[in-house]
Image (tube, rainbow, N blue to C red):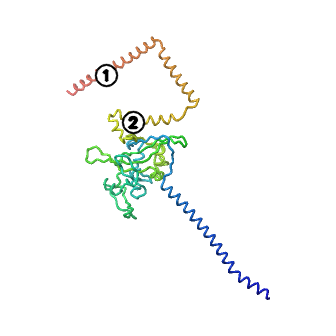
Amino acid sequence: MKRILTAIIIMSAAMPCIMAQKSVSSGISRKSATSDTHRTTARGGVNTAAGSATEVKTTDPAWMNVVYRSLDLNDPANAVLYYPEEAADGQDNLFRLMLRLIAGNNITAYEYLDGRENFSETNRLNVKDMLDRFQIMHTDAKGSTERRPLYEIADVDMPSTEILSYFIIESNEFDRRDSRMRRRIEAICPVLHRTEEFGQEAVRYPMFWVRYDDLKPHLALTSVFLSDENHVASSTLEDYFNLNLYNGEIFKTRNLRNKSMSQLYPDPDDLKHARDSIDKRIDAFADALWVPDPEEIARREEMKAASDTTTAATADAPKSRRISAARGASKKADKTVKKKSRSRRSTPAATRSVRNRRK
């Protein structure tokens, strides 16, 4: 009995020590877990901050050519950007999409500058000033504050029918990482065509710039028809731009003097030649990147040899054949002239007979 009581007393005395040890060990484990969590969060925070501070480079260009194009929405290739004129069946045109996103502060727009484009915070667009400048009716949206203004624009107040062209900044790059040529859009600017007085020619007003990368996630959600033959809207505006289905003439290149093509080439013929040569140089650079394989070289030589043989055969043809062919052609021409002269002489006679009947 005494032994049992002694054992109970010893156990009761040891229990507080055991509990204290457990609490200390659990506290240590909780502390280490918490510190690990803090370290993980800190690492994640650093990475997140670094990611937001620096953009991820998607390309490593070894060669680049930047041009500015004007997309005329009267061109059938660019009709996708204009239609539908009114939102229907979940479809919308590009301008209404852009204006809603800007008014709702979902994307950032930048001022259109006469000089070099600068997509920085200092040139961020004041949305209210832009809406007032172009006389677009708007109201304050729900949740709008002084620091974060939001605007609501009715469909009838959106001047989408006056957006008849777009400016785009297009970058043609050769990526050294995968040795591929890429055509990438950097920014888009809607251009308002507005007639101040009836009968006058419309004046073009570039409204604002939007970076394509900011707009891209929303373009991927906007379905469009890319063909009149297929009435299923199975493509998106992102597909349209990624496939380079648009058509536009170059009005400016990125140059040291920051001059437009019309300033560099005042003569219309010189301007057209310069535009064509820029497109040809871009295409030629892409074609010159690859050395043709032996089969391609052999095929080109065969085509050249066949062409030379045809030219030589024509040159070596007997002179009598060439003369007879020329005589035959001249006879046909004489017959055609005679037929035309007969028809011309018959017209006054028919006219006189009608006049005689009237008398």
Crowding at label 1, few (<14), some or many (≥20) Cα neighbours within 10 Å?
Answer: few
Q: Looking at the rendered structure, which numbered label has been put on residue 343?
A: 1
Q: Position of residue 160 (x, y in %)?
A: 36, 51
Quadrant assignment for the N terminus = bottom right
Q: Is residue 21 above or below residue 352?
A: below
Q: Residue at x 37, y 59 (%)?
A: 152
Read off the residue under disc 2: 275
Look at the image and tell me in which quarter the C terminus lies: top left
**291 versus 192 height, above or below:** above
Label 2, label 1: how far apart the Cα atoms are:
47 Å
In this picture, residue 62 sits left or right of residue 123: right
Which residue is more in the foreground, 83 or 146?
Answer: 146
Count of all numbered marks drawn on residues in the image? 2
Instruction: Tell me the quarter of the picture where residue 2 sits.
Output: bottom right
Q: Position of residue 124 (x, y in %)?
A: 38, 54
Residue name at image x 36 percent, y 64 percent = 146
Label 1, secondary structure: give it. helix
